[in-house]
Amino acid sequence: MKTTNINTYYQKLIYLILELHKSDFENAYPGHCMKITGLGLIELEYLWDLLKDEHKHLDVYIVLEEENLGLKYISATKLIELRNKQDKPLLILIPSNSRTAAEDSYGNATFKEIALEGLEDKLSKKLISDVPGSSREIIKEIFDFIKPNRTQIINYLIALEDLEYKPLEIGNNLHHLELIPDSELITNRIKLRSRLNFNRESVDILSSFDRVVHDRISDLRIDSESLQKQIASFLKVNNDFTNPKEIVEKVYNNNEGLNFSNWPIPDLNFSHITLSVTHIKSTALSIEDGTNVFSAIEGVSAKLKVRFTTNPNPNEIKEIKSFKIILMAVDGSNGEEISILRKVKNKITSRNYREATIELNSNLIDEGSYFIKVVAEDEHGNIINGNDDFKDPKIQKAWDKEKTENPDLEKSSFPYKLTCDSDDFHYEVEEALDKDENQRKDKLNNVLQAFLKYRIDALKNDEEYSIPEPSETSNIWINDGKEKHSSTFHINYSDKHNYQINISTKLRQIENKFLLNAESLGYVKCQLKSNKLAIGFENIEFVKSELNEIVPKSLLKLRKAVFDAIVNSNENEDGIFETTNIFIYKEEIKKYVDSYTKWTSKLKTQLESDKIELEEKTKLKEFLIELQMIDVARVKSKLPDGSKVEALLVSPLHPLRLAWAIQLIEVFEDWERKTREFSGHKEAWSHHLEDFFIGNLSPENNQLVLIEASSQKAYNYSGELSFGWGGLYLSTISQESKNGMTSISRQLQHYLRLLFNITKDNYVETDLSLKLVIRHIKNYLAQHPYIDKLVVNLFNAGDAEVFSSAFVELEKEKVFENINYEVRIFKGNDKIIEHGESLKTLINPESNISEEAEAFSQPSRNRLFPKLRFSINNIADFLKDPSSYTSHLSFLISPFPISIELIKPSIEDRNFYLNGLITDSSVIVDENGTQIKWNRFIQANKLPVKYDSTGTNSIKLFENIQSFISSALVSKFTTSIPSTQLRLNDRDKVLLTHLHDYSDWVITFDKNLGPQIFDQPSKDGKIPFLLDYVPGEELLGISSFLTTRPTSEVLGLLGPHFEEFNLDIHNEQDEHKIKILLEDLRAVSSSLVLQLNSTKNKAFEVIGSAFTKRVLEKKEMLKDAFLIPIDLHQNLFENLSSGSKSRADNLLVSMNPSKKKFLFL
């Protein structure tokens, strides 16, 4: 028997739940666990009564934190016990204020969620279908026009149902739609939309609570000295209004005199409907000598966008069914109709204007002067805007005068353009470009990549390789006549190999400064304008270095030869590194790098020597500090708040960058030769090996620190500004330390990209991996298959470009199509960039985006559950109240501050691989009590596989320059090397604690951090459990740590598999035993835990690995040995010569330290 009373709204929702999920409840079997979330406690009590009456076979409970509250209720602890018994099907009801994201005892991995999403949508449709036919059409028109939310629709329809749908009440109950009640709303259907629009406009004015009452009333469009005093009295008496809903409800309940039927509203007679074309817009439209010129390409259609408005607004005029867009020829009067270009339906939108895009085809339109006319039509094709004003105010004034004197005068007697006519434009047709110029061009970062793509295709097709020649009409800058933000270079080798290279014009200008001063060493100094729309610099100059006094003349001669070759690499002699086929000049560059390396080696030897005089040594140190600045750009600008920002940019012409390009060529030539010698290698090129040479690798031989010569200020490496341009060095360490958890460096990198107008296709992400973000999200959703809305917290994500791309990529897979996302971005107090800009773009329907991305910009069926919702929050708020920000996943991107420290590595490590192309820095950890710190450094090493001389020279040159930097840091020669140090402070530790307390999984991207803080024995569940560690899987060496508490999330995966061993995870003693085995599993590999939730056999294989480790440990077989779980490294065992598919679960590797041997068992 039901004892709980609730309002009609929730009654109807609850009855609909029972109706829609009746089969789920009836067919539930013992052990089947279900849950309902999203309703309040009172509503759940009402639902409980109904469920117990209708489905007596179900165990139904409301989950509360308190114990022993009665038969209806259950605590989380008791729920675990009941769930494990599995005697009856179980349905739990979780109040909406209960925190569920990080409490997995009733999480989606265990309990199937009875989804309430779309419930209000279904209820509103049912209520609309119940409306009698005579009223349904009017109500639908009201909804179509004002577009209320689902809750408002339901409340409105329930009220009308209670009042038996009386016509008078359709307007009187508008307060449910946040409008003023209007008893005359449907007395004149023609005026219905305008009454609604005027009503909504009035409510908006009355609810402008930031303005005084007098100002609000003066803005109302009502007759003077009518209702003003009554409205003012109403607002002053009720001065505690906080939202529009309170105003309109008060009118409904207590102020019948303010019913909208009593408002002296403006004349709504539609006999005078006018239309105005506000503007026309096209990329082909330009102004030449004060004339609009539309430049079309022969044989090609070009688009033109027309914007127009009507009075009243288009959405107020039901009679307008469509707009006709007409092309008119200019004839000195009101024009001659040429053709109807398009008809556009009058769609209902909230905008007070309409737009239509038309195509002008040069095959159909002759050159000449034209304009566009727009006319509004009703359903019978009658023109509605037949009385538009004249476009020229002088002619309109003359017409008004003539009309007054002669009322019978027809408008046709004045043959002039009207407001529904656009401005004139001259249409001209240009000749089509040559085929290869007009052909689609793939985008690359530089011409070297174009060359390598050409050679790789020849390799795949068994063609003779050669050095391709650019076509006659390519190898040039496109449309280089006027200065713009981005420069585009065209290179064409064939129809298949047709490419364009886009580069920031400002970066090109910096590079030109170096190339024009080829005979001197030096740096570029520039002042960058703080407006991203600005062209060029405030000032830019090349500064010659004092090193020119001591540099060998032979070195300068080689430098000039290389730089001149780059400039002269095309006929116009305006080449830069990116537009030059470096392959052709590889020998010249090798000689230059070799000479530069020998010179710096000699300088280093002199610095180490004790034989030179102190004064000479001091002068040499000054020279060596300045040497760091060679081929570097010193950039200054201002932040949005007016404060100064400085950065160092290493140009592509720097010897280390030039060397890296030659190292890439050396590896390519070696692999190309080996593939031609053995065709079996050809398959690898088809498996994305070519991507390795076409942009997946970018220069990594970057110093961690640079010292600016004049100020002696340290600048730390902060990533790449653009492909080939970097590193980007910023002096932000002191600011990072103050702020903590928000990387000023990441924000400045994005800010400078905006100022330099870097296009996204040239971005190089060194902190974050799209591939790994997608991997972690997929793994989480696989572990929690019932989740339909993923809640994600992002810390230090900047513009969130990688995450918006990840959501779009996931949308391409059918299994993730129905996932919604709620994203919270956390930032500091800085105001450098617009955080979450990419997410904002993703949900913008006007963005130029892919088909998958459109899912995020389209309105969802239920506006309460959009596809993507995001918010910007302050990190301080999270630290203050983390329980308000529970999430499924939290991502931290380089959140911890670093400092610079000189160290002497105690052991030799290998940091350069593959001819020096890949740099993998070393990270050492120092644990001292509660404090833990990491030092990241790079040291030179010999290459075990030699391709040619450049790799070795490049590493030696890196070592020489690093030595000069170290000496500059301590003002004397030292054998120590620079390192970046990361030390966790108390605030950082608090953040980590909160994150793991209120997030299911935490993913950290930080190249300065090692796994030690996570991968250590658990103590009372207080150390995060390392689930998955990816140490530099990407070519760029990006690492990630996936961590979670070893509590409900992990134990929930383990518990069910131990039931056959009579171990109950909810028993304290058994739980302790399971945790011991959990530690054994961690010792083998934490990543195995992710496989526990797959098949039963797989789960027992995983648990078997833990038992294997324990048995081997007891037999003392792990003293100098370790286990490798084969499942995590299957790629190592593919294509075995035996051809056998059978294998073991683990590989035992025994070590003999004295003989330096490994034995694999």
Image (cartoon, rainbow, N blue to C red):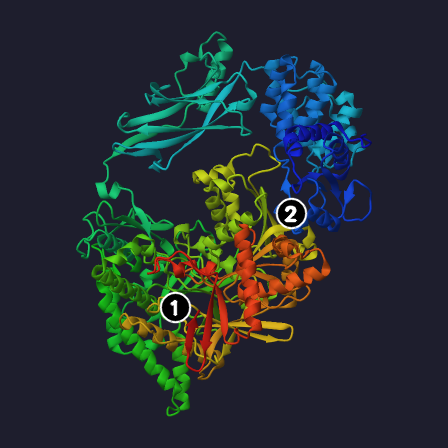
Tell me if 1087 is positioned left or right of 227 in this view.
left
Q: Which of 560 and 128 is in front in this view?
A: 128
| Residue 847 in sight in this render | no
Q: Circle 2 — which element? A: loop
- Name the quadrant of the C terminus: bottom left
Residue 452 horizontal/vertical position (percent): 27, 56
Amino acid carrying mark 1 in the image? Asn
Residue 682 horizontal/vertical position (percent): 26, 56
- Compared with residue 1, is residue 975 higher up or lower down, i.e. above or below? below
- Name the quadrant of the N terminus: top right
Residue 469 numbered tag = none
Residue assigned mark 2: 107
Residue assigned mark 1: 701
Q: Nearer the viewer, residue 173 or 531?
A: 173
Seen at 41% across and 53% down, the residue is 758
- Compared with residue 857, is residue 381 higher up or lower down, i.e. above or below? above
Seen at 25% across and 77% down, the residue is 553
Q: Circle 1 — which element? A: loop
Tell me if 98 is positioned left or right of 606 in this view.
right
Residue reaching furthest to the bottom: 611
Amino acid carrying mark 2 in the image? Gly
- Compared with residue 47, is residue 759 higher up or lower down, i.e. above or below? below
Q: Which of 106 and 279 is in front in this view?
A: 106
* Count of picture labels: 2
Residue 311 horizontal/vertical position (percent): 53, 22
Residue 778 horizontal/vertical position (percent): 51, 49
Seen at 26% across and 57% down, the residue is 680
| Residue 515 in sight in this render | yes
Q: In which quarter of the image is residue 1109?
A: bottom right
**Upstream in sequence: badge 2 or badge 1:** 2
